[in-house]
Amino acid sequence: MSRIDRSKKTQNLSNVTIVRLAVKIKSDFSLPPGPQISPQQQSKEWIEHPIDFWEACAKEYGDFFTVQLGSLGSVVLMSHPEAVRQVFALSPKVFQCHQYNEHYKYVMGEHSVLVQDGERHKAQRKQIVPPLHIERIKIYAEQICQITRQITDSWPSDHPFSVRLSMHELSLQVILQTIFGDSEQVLKQQITSLFRSQIFQDLGSWSPWARFGHLHPLLRKMIGDAMDKRRKNPDPNSTDIFNLLLSIESLSDAEIQDHIFTFFIAGVDTTALGLTWALYWIHKNSEILEKIRQELDSLPNEVEPMAIAKLPYLTATCQEVLRMYPVVTTPTGRKLTAPVEIMDYHFEPGVTLLPCTYLVHHREDIYANPHAFQPERFLSRQYAPYEYFPFGGGNRVCVGAGLAQLELKLVLATILSRFQLTSAIEGEVKPVRHGTLLAPSENMKLKILQQQY
Ligand code: HEM
């Protein structure tokens, strides 16, 4: 990289001077400055204290800074909205993402969309985006409410409980329902008990999903048997994702299984943590809770779940939840395969460009009082997709964004209509790492004051 001088003076230079300047720019590609600590220390800070690390770097170096991240090499973090817009608008021909997502290969499978690039990535998105389109997922709205009722039935009435585990279970049930529909009851139960015993045992800072890779042979066998059964007895009326994937002739069994693993890993923890954060913020602030309740009370008794999803204050609260602590703190890093210019900067191939969601979501020039939780900001202003981007952007934008947003709203509405809860937190709730995600620490507890029905 080098900073390109776009000052007016440049326009007066002769063509020869401009050519010389361009040659100089290409041969002098130093990167934006960044922390002076060793690459090992930088990786450690990134893993252990990501927010403090980014905030300190932004304070020192501004909107662009370079960090060294292990095998990824030089990663340029950007928190200027115009830079984010330009990165999301880049042609997929000039970057690759599989290097950034390499570690997911072992848990999602080698065919996962997250580890593809170019034409294969484009083709795979065509397979998995339509079944998750908002018009299709509407059919799961009632089931999301039902699953919420089932899971919350087991909440203890006499002592505080940690909501995080039940949100992981709930989110798993929603994904299972979306993939397999009302069929495959036995398979869904088997997968649920595997998750209970192997995955949801430890919600600590390092994601237990690493263990998921060891479950692949067993899961492939279980899903493979279900595939054989469906192929022998096809149900033309079934609308679930499993059926849709089975109907794509070009897909191998391993590819279908990897798509399913990808939905589990990309969709369960992310939504569960979004829900846990939402319950935290709502119960930390009684005014916000009251406003959501009033909105819910204004609805008729028998209401379509999709009417709940349109409620403005509930929607604004869910948006603010993902602004404040974006569960996925950055989109996938784009590793350049060709030279690229972003704002005043020129970047050479090999450099990874990474918009920093957390830093953009906390810019004072976009969000007044950025560290305060204020859903109202989403009612008074519409933010551009490069100012607010909890689901990433461009050709890699999250395929489950519609489902996740619907789930957040319906689960919260169902819980708040059923229970009066109060916060039972001991100490301070801190954002902690859960794999690559940002989770509330485990002391985030609630207590039931009253159950309505
Ligand atoms: C609150 C919940 C969620 C959040 C915050 C979230 C966020 C994200 C982000 C930031 C990305 C990277 C986008 C980029 O690189 O520009 C992503 C990718 C992805 N997400 Fe989500 N996600 C959520 C839920 C889901 C759900 C429910 C599913 C599936 C059912 C899902 C499936 C995926 C997939 C498959 C990708 C990879 C897309 C690609 O590489 O082309 N996500 N998500």
Image (spheres, helix red, strand yellow):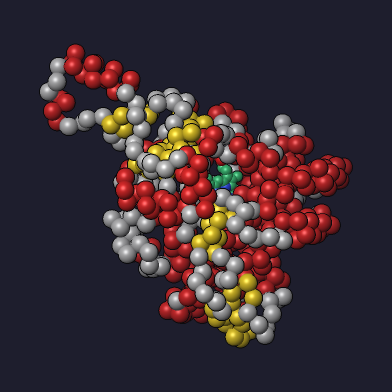
Position of residue 302 relative to residue 397, above or below, is below
Q: Picture coordinates of residue 385 (x, y %)? A: 40, 48
Quarter of the picture containing the C terminus is bottom right
Look at 45% across and 80% down and name the residue there.
286
Q: Closest to the observer: 271 or 292?
A: 271
Look at 58% across and 39% down and name the residue there.
101
For the question of whether residue 386 can be seen, the reply is yes
Q: Picture coordinates of residue 274 (x, y %)? A: 54, 61
Residue 340 quadrant: top left
Q: Picture coordinates of residue 121 (x, y %)? A: 58, 33
On the rendered structure, is 344 left or right of 219? left
For the question of whether residue 145 can be seen, the reply is no
Instruction: Find the residue positioned furthest to the top.
Output: 16
Position of residue 36 relative to residue 422, above or below, is above
Q: Closest to the observer: 223 or 74?
A: 74
Residue 412 quadrant: bottom right
Q: Closest to the observer: 251 or 27?
A: 27
Look at 14% across and 31% down and name the residue there.
8
Position of residue 424 relative to residue 444, above or below, is below
Quarter of the picture containing the N terminus is top left
Callout count: 0
On the rendered structure, is 413 left or right of 288? right
On the rendered structure, is 387 left or right of 15? right
Look at 37% across and 52% down and name the residue there.
56
Q: Picture coordinates of residue 152 (x, y %)? A: 67, 73
